[in-house]
Amino acid sequence: MTPTTTDAQPDERAERSGHTEPSVRTRGLTRIFGEGDAAVEALKGIDLEIASGELVVILGPSGSGKTTLCNIIGGIDRASDGTVEVAGEDISTEDPGRLSDFRRDHVGFIFQFFNLIPTLTARENVEVIIEMTGRGDKGRVPELLEAVGLGDRVDNFPAQLSGGQQQRVAVARALATDPELLFADEPTGALDLPTGQQILALLQDLNAQGRTVIIVTHNSSVAQIANRVLTLVDGRIESDETNTSPAAAADVTW
């Protein structure tokens, strides 16, 4: 990776990268867990903009606040202080019902440990999200599974799939509601190198289709595929680097 550290303003960075509209904007974002002497400040005043269509890697060690940051941006968690705008909507003070609607309408999540329902087939694991959210088209599920390389495994149960194949089902499930913002939390953490490369290539393809993709990882090698790399340390953004020459997923090693 050949990133160059930049102090450019968000509009300048967006123009240079070819992305213009902010998909995510946070100001003074703070998250405190616990109270009194037991309080832990996981995020410490994060100011951030991510342009629509960027592929961003949020890098940092365990406990740096990277997953907390994405959970707040994605509407899973709520900040203790500060503001969050996603797709032009201020979600900082939304009630739980509205946050649920926001996640349904705008956001897809891919988690490290797949979270598939073992008694459902690949097809059914994707369909259940459509049924739960009321968003998406069940008729497109075979197409989604075909797009992630599982066209011949739609009727297999999770136990009949490899780890990489299960992660692909999780990707298809995240895409079922056609989100404009896609989060991937340690998407390669449970995978071997060849399978991890395949998942990273899939994320690059989804980004090339116009989705904003945010990958959370402690693996610095994954940052090679990003347009931009944010490094979090102790709840603060330590660096914000633009990658002028993102690598192909097949060239990433760890």
Image (cartoon, rainbow, N blue to C red):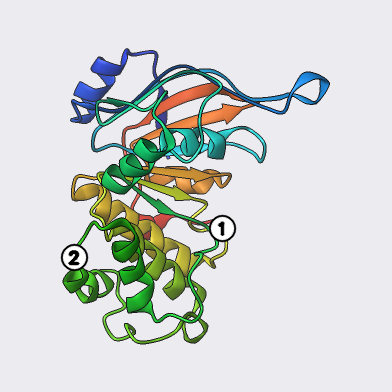
Number of marks present in the image shown: 2
Work out whether residue 246 can be spotted: no
The disc at residue 144 is none
Picture coordinates of residue 60, whole percent (x, y): 58, 36
**Vertical position of residue 185 compared to residue 84: above or below:** below
- Residue displayed at 44% across by 84% down: 157
Residue on which disc 1 sits: 189
Relative side of 127 to 77, left or right: left
- Residue displayed at 18% across by 30% down: 18
Q: Looking at this rendering, what residue extends furthest in the right direction?
A: 37
**Vertical position of residue 43 compared to residue 163: above or below:** above
| The quadrant where residue 203 appears | bottom left
| The quadrant where residue 11 appears | top left
- Residue displayed at 31% across by 48% down: 104
The N terminus lies in which quarter of the figure? top left
Question: Which tag, 2 or 1, sits closer to the chain's start?
Answer: 2
Q: Nearer the viewer, residue 191 or 24?
A: 24
Secondary structure under the numbered disc 1 in the rendered image: loop
| The quadrant where residue 122 appears | bottom left
User: Type of residue at label 1?
Assistant: Gly
Picture coordinates of residue 165, whole percent (x, y): 42, 75
Picture coordinates of residue 120, whole percent (x, y): 43, 80
Q: Crowding near pointer 1: few (<14 within 10 Å), some, many (20+)?
A: some
The C terminus lies in which quarter of the figure? bottom right
Secondary structure under the numbered disc 2 in the rendered image: loop
Picture coordinates of residue 81, whole percent (x, y): 52, 17
Residue on which disc 2 sits: 137
Q: Nearer the viewer, residue 192 or 122?
A: 122
